[in-house]
């Protein structure tokens, strides 16, 4: 954007000049041809992304069960998203999940990456692979495995009993206070690997001179981390946050397999509501409205993260 | 400056896409509301229909279900070589999520399994996508072989709004009833030789089992819906059957907030208080729960006949199945049918489609179903089950149908009832809601729907 911003005003002031310059040719061909180059990709993009998106927006304005003729509902479906306390709560749960999916892995990932990056351990590649491993497993498999671990007779309770913490044992996924954090921690476990590997890659690019300079100035390991490593990782942190926040907001499979939104509605999330309404309850209009709101929220948050990360760069 | 073409393009693209999407959702499907039943005679001799191809979508993919449909399809093909079956089998969930779209399109399957409830069969009837089968019911004598209490479950008014009466839109192969599985070995430890046949005796036996140091009832309610069957069983003892039918089929004129239903909800809470369930009822999955039961945990498991084959295999003669001990003169039990087979209103070969449904549900087919460890929905008493528990199940279902004592699954009532009732029961069992609050939540769902549905 910035390079065009400086060039634009002169052209805008003299339209004739612009035209002459275009006809004059080099460098490059007439601009309209550019569109021809992107046309194939644009068509695919429009057919599989823009059209479905707009169609979803349109459906969200109707009351539709998916089979019969829809009736116009105006903004009723959106009013429901804002007005229904259970639906509002599901968006709240998604925000809680952000803490578990994005913030917690970032903190743990920074520590892990700092340790792995500093220590000259043998077999670093091996450890990096191990940390990354959860990312390779399908989410449904992870959910099934954790559901067993969280069961009343599962390994987590066994572990707690073994170390004398019988008072803490419970059916984790059926407990009204523990269920949402329990689901969130699966996300934390899943995302730590991704975040750590991203940060490790970023640390590898930091020039060693910076560390030497810091050390000459008398900085310890901790200070070094805050004045050199952290600022240099701004870009990687932004990427990690964007990916994990989006993952948190669109969580579906995890909730679908582990709790189905229960107990009560204490772990229901927007994506699960979308699926439930569209495919189970035949309320497609309402499902589309939730999906649109969710899309807007995801867009806004990721846009915000990139803007903050790129400021003062 | 370079921005302008981009914005313009986005605007043009948006307009174009809006133009493409301008038609109202659902306007592609022909016919809304009631589609008149076709009239005229029907051909019940499939051999005379010429070369015909039938596309069949089913979800009979597991164990005995797969065995019976493969056997019946083979027999059908052998008997009527002029009819070619194109079978598409999917899991239950896959079928549920894809059938709606398929029926809206031009390549709808001829015969398919459509779940009984309003979000499925009811919706398709409303959209005019199902063929009423009443003419075939007369021609093939289905009306005589299937009692009304069974046909109810696939009957809707032509506009799809009233469930439980009206035209017949499908025919099931198998029956289902929720009853009590009992572990005789655990009962013996509590000094009980059999399951009490009356409700008061049953409740007393729960305490006896508890006193003997065993767990009286096994329930895993993590999946939300299992408690619906337990509540339904209790409610069937406190509330008159016709009231439950009104509520269960989502017909107008019923009420959840009655003294009878309060008593049912209070009974569940009492059972929680007395420790009849395990401590973590909401944290235990459905499958782990019945697997624990099959390994000797607990005296009773309130569940449906679909578990009979698995429990029979694991427990042998230790397990028995009975209808819920009755509190009123006649037994009342939650139950219904397997997923009914229906015919698309767009099919070019309705006669062949109906002939296929008749073939997989006739008396010989019921024999095949019994042999493959399914519960035949008709002629149940005439069939011989392959195992002792199977015979218990046949007897229980036969009795329930003969006495007209089946009441529908409560989540049939409204498209959202499964979620509402499931979540509300988790709240009730965890004591996050009182019986009164629980019933108000459910009444709101039912009341809102009935008010809108008319």
Image: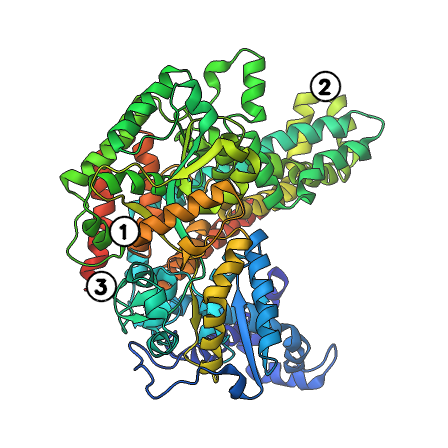
> Where the N terminus of chain B falls, by quadrant?
bottom right
| Quadrant hosting residue B201 | top left
Residue at coordinates 35% horizontally, 22% vertically from top-left?
Answer: B275
The image position of residue B444, as x and y in percent, is 21, 49
Against A161, residue B412 (above or below) is below
Residue B65, disc: none
The location of residue B182, given as percent across then percent down, is 42, 32
Q: Which marked residue is nearer to the observer: mark 1 or mark 2?
A: 1
Foreground tag (1 vs 3): 1
**Chain name for mark 2:** A
Disc 3 target residue: B453
Q: Is residue A10 visible?
A: no
Q: Name the chain under label 1.
A: B
Label 3 chain ID:
B
- Total number of numbered discs in the rendering: 3
State whether residue B28 is above or below residue A240.
below
Q: Which residue is under mark 1?
A: B403
Residue A70 position within the rendered picture, expressed as x and y whole percent measured from the top left: 33, 72
Residue where numbered disc 2 is placed? A218
Question: Residue at 32% across / 53% down in the picture?
Answer: B401
Badge 3: residue crowd in 10 Å (few <14, some 14–19, many ≥20): few
C-alpha gap between disc 1 and disc 3: 31 Å
Between B93 and B134, the one lying in front of the other is: B134
Marked residue nearer the N-terminal end (1 or 3): 1
């Amino acid at each position: 954007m910035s390079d065009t911003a400086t060039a634009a005003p002169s052209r805008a002031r003299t339209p004739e000049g612009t035209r002459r310059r275009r006809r004059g040719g080099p460098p490059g061909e007439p601009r309209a041809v550019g569109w021809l180059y992107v046309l194939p990709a644009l068509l695919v993009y429009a057919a599989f992304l823009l059209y479905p998106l707009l169609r979803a927006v349109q459906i969200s304005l109707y009351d539709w069960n998916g089979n019969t003729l829809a009736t116009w509902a105006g903004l009723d479906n959106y009013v429901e998203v804002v007005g229904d306390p259970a639906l509002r709560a599901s968006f709240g749960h998604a925000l809680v999940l952000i803490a578990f999916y994005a913030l917690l892995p970032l903190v743990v990932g920074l520590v892990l990456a700092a340790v792995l990056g500093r220590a000259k351990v043998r077999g670093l590649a091996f450890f990096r692979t191990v940390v990354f491993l959860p990312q390779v497993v399908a989410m449904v498999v992870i959910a099934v495995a954790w559901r067993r671990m969280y069961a009343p007779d599962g390994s987590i309770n066994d572990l707690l009993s073994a170390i004398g913490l019988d008072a803490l044992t419970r059916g984790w996924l059926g407990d009204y206070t523990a269920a949402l954090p329990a689901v969130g921690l699966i996300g934390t476990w899943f995302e730590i690997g991704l975040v750590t590997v991203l940060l490790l890659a970023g640390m590898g690019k930091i020039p060693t001179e910076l560390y030497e300079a810091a050390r000459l100035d008398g900085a310890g390991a901790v200070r070094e981390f805050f004045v050199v490593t952290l600022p240099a990782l701004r870009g990687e942190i932004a990427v990690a946050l964007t990916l994990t926040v989006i993952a948190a907001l669109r969580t579906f499979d995890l909730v679908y397999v582990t709790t189905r939104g229960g107990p009560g509605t204490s772990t229901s999330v927007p994506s699960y509501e979308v699926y439930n309404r569209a495919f189970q309850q035949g309320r497609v209009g309402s499902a589309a409205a939730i999906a649109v709101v969710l899309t807007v929220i995801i867009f806004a948050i990721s846009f915000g993260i990139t803007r903050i990360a790129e400021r003062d760069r | 400056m370079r921005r302008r073409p981009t914005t313009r393009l986005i605007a043009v693209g948006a307009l174009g896409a809006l133009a493409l999407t301008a038609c109202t959702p659902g306007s592609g499907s022909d016919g809304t509301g009631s589609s008149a039943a076709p009239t005229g005679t029907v051909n019940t001799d499939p051999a005379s229909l010429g070369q015909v191809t039938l596309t069949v979508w089913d979800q009979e993919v597991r164990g005995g279900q797969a065995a019976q449909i493969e056997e019946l399809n083979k027999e059908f093909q052998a008997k009527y070589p002029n009819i070619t079956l194109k079978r598409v089998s999917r899991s239950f969930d896959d079928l549920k999520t894809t059938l709606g779209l398929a029926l809206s399109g031009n390549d709808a399957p001829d015969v398919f399994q459509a779940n009984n409830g309003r979000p499925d069969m009811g919706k398709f009837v409303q959209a005019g996508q199902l063929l009423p089968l009443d003419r075939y019911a007369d021609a093939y004598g289905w009306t005589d072989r299937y009692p009304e209490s069974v046909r109810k479950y696939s009957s809707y008014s032509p506009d799809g709004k009233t469930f439980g009466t009206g035209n017949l839109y499908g025919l099931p192969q198998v029956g289902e009833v929720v009853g009590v599985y009992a572990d005789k070995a655990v009962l013996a430890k509590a000094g009980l030789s059999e399951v009490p046949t009356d409700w008061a005796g049953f409740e007393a036996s729960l305490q006896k089992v508890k006193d003997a140091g065993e767990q009286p009832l096994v329930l895993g309610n993590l999946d939300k819906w299992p408690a619906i069957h337990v509540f339904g069983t209790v409610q069937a003892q406190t509330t008159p059957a016709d009231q439950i039918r009104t509520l269960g089929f989502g017909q107008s004129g019923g009420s959840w907030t009655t003294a009878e239903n309060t008593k049912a909800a209070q009974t569940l809470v009492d059972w929680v208080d007395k420790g009849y369930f395990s401590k973590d009822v909401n944290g235990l999955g459905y499958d782990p729960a019945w697997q624990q039961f099959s390994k000797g945990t607990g005296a009773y498991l309130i569940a449906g006949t679909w578990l009979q084959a698995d429990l029979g295999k694991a427990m042998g003669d230790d397990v028995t199945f009975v209808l819920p001990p009755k509190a009123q003169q006649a037994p009342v039990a939650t139950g219904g049918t397997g997923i009914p087979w229906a015919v698309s209103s767009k099919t070019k070969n309705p006669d062949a489609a109906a002939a296929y449904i008749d073939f997989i549900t006739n008396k010989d087919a019921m024999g095949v179903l019994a042999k493959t460890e399914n519960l035949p929905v008709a002629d149940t008493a005439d069939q011989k089950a392959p195992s002792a528990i199977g015979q218990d199940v046949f007897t229980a279902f036969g009795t329930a149908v003969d006495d007209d004592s089946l009441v529908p699954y409560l989540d049939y009532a409204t498209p959202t009832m499964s979620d509402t009732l499931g979540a509300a029961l988790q709240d009730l069992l965890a004591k996050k809601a009182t019986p009164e609050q629980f019933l108000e939540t459910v009444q709101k769902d039912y009341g809102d729907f009935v008010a809108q549905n008319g």
